[in-house]
Image (cartoon, rainbow, N blue to C red):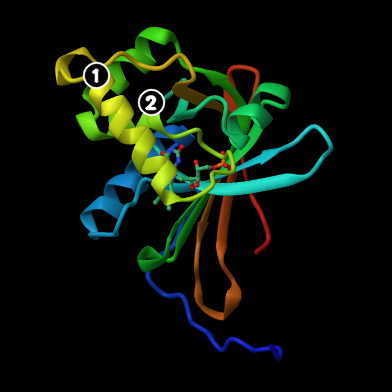
């Protein structure tokens, strides 16, 4: 196929990000922007790109859903034996990227990832619909499978194994990860490519902020 050019060229003028009004705590600042993304009606504002790095230095990225966040970190849930799960067990450094296009905003979060406690994973697993809980048992996430019918058969088998929706335990291989941030950057698109970038870096127990050139 011949090379294709893309033509998007947009002026960003929805907002501004200013050291004097941004929160001193980046998690509170994230919370504020997340609320604004929800209020703006952005589709799946909790969707974020999770980047991991394998032992050989090769990066990989995929979208996962942010399920909760607080001063301890940002949590998502997945299969611990998936590609991302295996990569994180060898190299816990990871990055999360949000792009809220309608607000012309990006947030980049970096830090170390650790598994959530079994109790936290159990609580979140129990809150999922039964089809998702059966799905967690059925899918050997990231493995090659011969065809869709294999997946459907695995699902049917697990559905039969757990006929009572109230008695579906969490599989050992499924649970949460919490990314404990040491760097969070907020990006707000501005006219003439003079975008605002505020970065917060953790310095022992406090956060230091700086403005970066766009
Ligand atoms: C909007 C969206 C949300 C997703 N949320 C999750 C999630 O929360 N957890 C998850 O394991 N995979 C989620 N996925 C699927 C992942 O992108 C990915 O396909 C899967 O986790 C396997 O990735 P891996 O082979 O790199 O481990 C989501 C995909 C999309 C597009």
At x 59%, y 86%, the residue is 6
At x 21%, y 54%, the residue is 39
Which is more toward the observer, 83 or 29? Answer: 83
Pointer 2 with pointer 1, Cβ within 8 A: yes
Residue 100, by quadrant, is bottom left
Task: Identify the residue under disc 1.
Answer: 162
Identify the mark nearer the N-term, 2 or 1.
2
Q: Where is residue 189 in the image (x, y as percent from the top left)?
A: 50, 67
Q: Quadrant of the C terminus?
A: bottom right
Q: Position of residue 55 (x, y in %)?
A: 80, 32
Vertical placement of residue 72 versus 32, above or below: above
Vertical placement of residue 104 versus 138, above or below: below
Q: Where is residue 120 in the image (x, y as percent from the top left)?
A: 36, 14
At x 46%, y 14%, the residue is 172
| Mark 1 Cα shell of 10 Å, populated few (<14), some (14-19), many (≥20) | some
Question: Which mark, residue 137?
Answer: 2
Q: In which quarter of the image is the N terminus?
A: bottom right
At x 25%, y 51%, the residue is 38
Vertical placement of residue 190 versus 57, above or below: below
Mark 1: which secondary structure? loop
Distance of label 2 from label 1 (alpha carbons): 10 Å
Mark 2: which secondary structure? helix
């Amino acid at each position: 196929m011949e090379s294709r050019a893309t033509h998007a060229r947009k002026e960003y003028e929805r907002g501004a990000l200013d050291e004097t009004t941004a929160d001193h705590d980046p998690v509170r600042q994230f919370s504020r922007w997340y609320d604004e993304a929800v209020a703006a009606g952005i589709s799946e504002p909790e969707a974020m790109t999770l980047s991991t790095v394998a032992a050989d230095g090769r990066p990989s990225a995929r979208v996962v859903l942010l399920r909760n966040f607080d001063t301890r970190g940002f949590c998502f849930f997945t299969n611990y034996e998936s590609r991302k799960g295996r990569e994180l067990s060898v190299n816990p450094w990871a990055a999360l990227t949000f792009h809220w296009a309608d607000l012309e905003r990006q947030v980049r979060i970096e830090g170390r990832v650790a598994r959530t406690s079994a109790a936290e994973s159990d609580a979140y697993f129990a809150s999922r619909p039964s089809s998702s809980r059966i799905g967690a048992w059925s899918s050997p996430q990231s493995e090659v499978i011969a065809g869709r019918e294999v997946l459907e058969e695995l699902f049917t088998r697990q559905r039969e194994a757990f006929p009572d929706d109230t008695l579906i335990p969490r599989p050992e291989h499924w649970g949460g990860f919490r990314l404990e941030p040491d760097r969070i950057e907020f990006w707000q698109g501005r006219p003439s490519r003079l975008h605002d970038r505020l970065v917060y870096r953790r310095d022992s127990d406090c956060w230091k902020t700086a403005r970066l050139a766009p």
